Image (cartoon, rainbow, N blue to C red):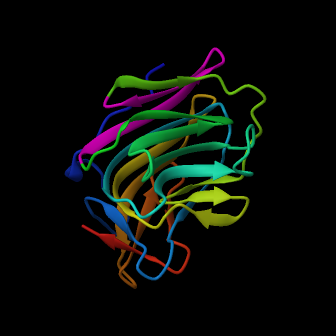
């Protein structure tokens, strides 16, 4: 089954009039962590695709997507972060594994679960493979931070998000594109699958570019 895992051209998406399409949204943690709650529970059978560019990592790490019950295996949930200490990508699905060194380039990231193995791809090339034995489902997945049982963590850096899509059992449940809400100028994500706007949460802010 083709899941349409590709980048979108800027002009290929038309949004309802109250929203203006932008190229990306970026988290600004100057006043605290900001995140978007996708409403998608962290499951081992999630397929995620993100088009993103890491800008900066604070003293800990910067999450792209993440939802977990705790930092203990097998409650690590499903998350992808860029760590400061190792300088590598950390991929967690019940257990964790380190991937390639992170950089400041724009990449596509895809995670999928197939025949008991969770795989992470960067720009179409396999970079992490792990077996999430005893996986414990987590809370909703956040973007720009990890949802640690309701507490937003690992969002003190910054990254640009150009798009994000999520499938559950092969069904597209989120299809996010960056936008700005015209009524108040708030940047956020518009879900083309559910025709809904997702605003940022937390004390931090999103910027649009």
Name the spot of residue 24 as percent of width and height, x first: 30, 60
Residue at x 52% of width, y 50% of height: 65
Residue 83's x, y, as percent? 45, 50
What secondary structure prevails in the magenta region? strand
Residue furthest to the top in view is 115
In the displayed structure, does residue 74 sit left or right of residue 124?
right
Above or below: residue 104 compared with residue 208? above
Residue 147 within the segment the image draws in magenta = no
Percent of width and height locating residue 97: 54, 33
Residue 111: where, in percent of width, then height?
50, 32
**Quadrant of the drawing holding the C terminus:** bottom left
Residue 4 visible, this orientation: no
Q: Considering depth in this image, is 124 or 129 the residue closer to the camera?
A: 129
* Image point (66%, 34%), residue name: 95
Q: Quadrant of residue 8?
A: top left
Residue ID at (63%, 14%): 115
Do we see residue 125 in this rendering?
A: yes
Q: Considering only vertical position in the picture, is 138 above or below 96?
A: below
Horizontal relation, residue 167 to residue 108: left or right:
right
What segment carries the magenta color?
Answer: 105-123
């Amino acid at each position: 089954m083709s899941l349409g895992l590709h980048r979108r051209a800027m002009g290929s998406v038309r949004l309802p009039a109250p929203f203006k399409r932008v190229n990306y949204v970026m988290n600004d943690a100057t006043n605290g962590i900001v995140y978007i709650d996708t409403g998608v529970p962290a499951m081992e059978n999630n397929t995620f695709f993100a088009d993103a560019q890491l800008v900066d990592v604070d003293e800990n790490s910067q999450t792209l997507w993440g939802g977990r019950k705790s930092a203990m295996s097998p409650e690590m949930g499903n998350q992808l972060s860029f760590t400061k200490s190792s300088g590598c990508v950390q991929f967690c699905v019940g257990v964790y594994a380190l991937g390639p060194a992170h950089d400041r380039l724009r990449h596509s990231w895809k995670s999928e679960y197939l025949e008991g193995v969770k795989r992470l791809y960067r720009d179409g090339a396999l970079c992490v493979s792990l077996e999430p034995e005893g996986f414990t489902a987590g809370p909703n997945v956040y973007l720009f931070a990890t949802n640690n049982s309701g507490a937003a963590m690992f969002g003190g850096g910054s990254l640009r998000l150009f798009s994000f899509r999520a499938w559950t059992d092969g069904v597209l449940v989120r299809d996010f594109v960056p936008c700005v809400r015209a009524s108040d100028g708030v940047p956020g994500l518009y879900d083309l699958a559910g025709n809904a706007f997702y605003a940022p949460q937390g004390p931090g802010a999103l910027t649009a570019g």
